[in-house]
Amino acid sequence: MGKQADTKLVDYVVVGGGSAGCVLASRLSEDPGVTVCLLEAGPSDTNPTIHVPAGMLWLMRSKVLNWQFNTEPESHLAGRKLFWPRGRMLGGSSSMNAMCYTRGHPQDYDGWAAQGNAGWGFDDVLPYFRRSEDQSRGASTYHGAGGPLHVSDFRAPSPLTRTYIAAGVQAGFPENEDFNDGENQEGVGYFQVTQKNGLRWSAAKGYLDPARDRPNLHIITAAMAHRVLLEGQGDERRAVGVEYQHQGKLHTIKARHEVILSAGALQSPQLLMLSGIGPGPHLQQHGITTLVDLPGVGQNLQDHLDVMVVHQGKRALSRGLTPQNILGGPWSFYQLMAHGQGMFTSNGAEGCGFLKSDPSEPIPDLQLHFMPARMRNHGRDLRFLMGQGFSMHVCDLHPKSRGQITLKDKNPASHPAIQANYLSHPDDIAKMVKGIKQVRRIFAAPAFDHDRGAELAPGPQVTTDEQLADYIRQHAETIYHPVGTCKMGTFATDPMAVVDDHLRVRGVRGLRVVDASIMPTLVGGNTNAPTIMIGEKASDLIKAARRA
């Protein structure tokens, strides 16, 4: 493969067309005097299964639209390799996720600011959440209306989800109608979702679609970035472009002002390391010349580890692949397309909960995702999904375990090595054992008496803390929230910081990282809305730098 003879030149190159990348491409190209190129390794978002919420089941199995990463063997999870799905198309994971709209707790962001990241406290980031949002309930102190990202209530929730909420109240938890209403996060209720008229509303739909026809925005799909191009030495080292592969050839695109990595918590650090930016000894191990020795690149990996409690159901109410639902599929599809209603509008995880594992906890430390279906193995076990039943995910919101992303080799097409190190801190498994107990309390409430069949997992024979801990080690999986691998921090005091509070990469001019990898700590909730917020705030930082 030889390099293409012509070299393109734009003002900004954005690598990665996921949630944050879509925001940046849209916001930066609002100025007609600025040229922007967005590089996305996957295809466009034209596949219809992307836009039908129930299409998630197919997307979990797709080898075209899903990166289908796997971790290395996890020593505290019985040596298992965990499946990590990530979106590989315009919109990234916002084009294949469960569309759950939560932001975390205000203290999460105030914690970022307390670590020295000026401008990242909750009061600082709230305007960007509001700017991004088109809340179907209307604008309020905590919500925006008219923004690119539609946020709505479920059009056709399952009766089982209503039962879950009633059971949660019976178990002593408050009902919560808005998990994003400032400090009021605790309780049980329905998720709000990034949907419009019952269809998925991804970052690509909200941000890219209105901008696609702008003459100053160039979107290149099937473009695999190989490395960031650097020039200069020492303090004068600067990112000047990106080398990428497209249609079997290597191409180069140069940036007048900045290169921005928005490839996500796995691939942004991978691309930095392939470019010679990262831990020197690790780069040398793979024959990569160290241009900027940054030990924090790929470190600080955090994720929400999740475990499920599953019950057999007594009534034909499940949203799984039951005979009733299969026979009713054509009618459900008609309801979706004609009225934005019906079973196909379901994201699977309809019920939300933020609970305290113990009353002494200052803020919720557990999150629930209730599913009105029998589920295991990320919905890929279709035979299990055919039965009647219901499931609950529970995760520890603030894990203390830390992992890392490293290179397997210097081939840009290779997947990075994911070592999540789940449960390496002993406090994490104790918290998850408490989580299972809280879920069992809810499922034992009278509201479920008409629907509660046998407990299929962990199973009635699993009762002691050690038995529950062993079940967790054997069966826990990701709930899809990896962050932290290009940590934001203060360079003077934090040697593991990769970017500063303006998201500029340490030791390289003209290079930023803008995605979930910059989170210094994991937020207590789903990560898609916070990632979009990061893109919104970064767009203002980048515009301000250009004006300076």
Image (tube, rainbow, N blue to C red):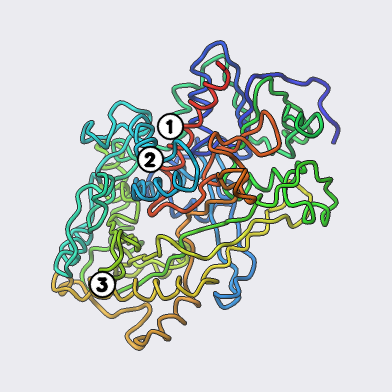
Which residue in the structure is indicated by mark 2?
A: 200
Q: Nearer the viewer, mark 2 or mark 3?
A: 2
Quarter location, residue 235: top right
| Name of the residue lying farthest toward the top | 33
- In the rendered structure, the answer to whether residue 316 lies left or right of residue 26 reads left
Whether the residues at callouts 2 and 1 have beta carbons within 8 Å, the answer is: yes
Which residue in the structure is indicated by mark 1?
A: 205
Q: Position of residue 280 (x, y in %)?
A: 78, 51
- In the rendered structure, the answer to whether residue 52 lies left or right of residue 474 reads left
Q: CA distance from mark 1 to mark 3?
A: 37 Å
Whether the residues at callouts 2 and 3 have beta carbons within 8 Å, the answer is: no
Are there few (<14), some (14-19), or many (20+) residues within 10 Å of tag 2? many
Q: Nearer the viewer, residue 61 or 449?
A: 449
Which residue in the structure is indicated by mark 3?
A: 313
The C terminus, quarter of image: top right
The N terminus, quarter of image: top right
- As helix, strand or loop, the secondary structure at mark 3 comes to strand
Which amino acid lies under the numbered mark 1 shown in the image of this protein? Answer: Lys
Q: Please tell me which of labels 2 and 3 falls first in the chain.
A: 2
Q: Position of residue 328 (x, y in %)?
A: 28, 54
Which amino acid lies under the numbered mark 3 shown in the image of this protein? Answer: Gly
Q: Please tell me which of labels 2 and 1 falls first in the chain.
A: 2
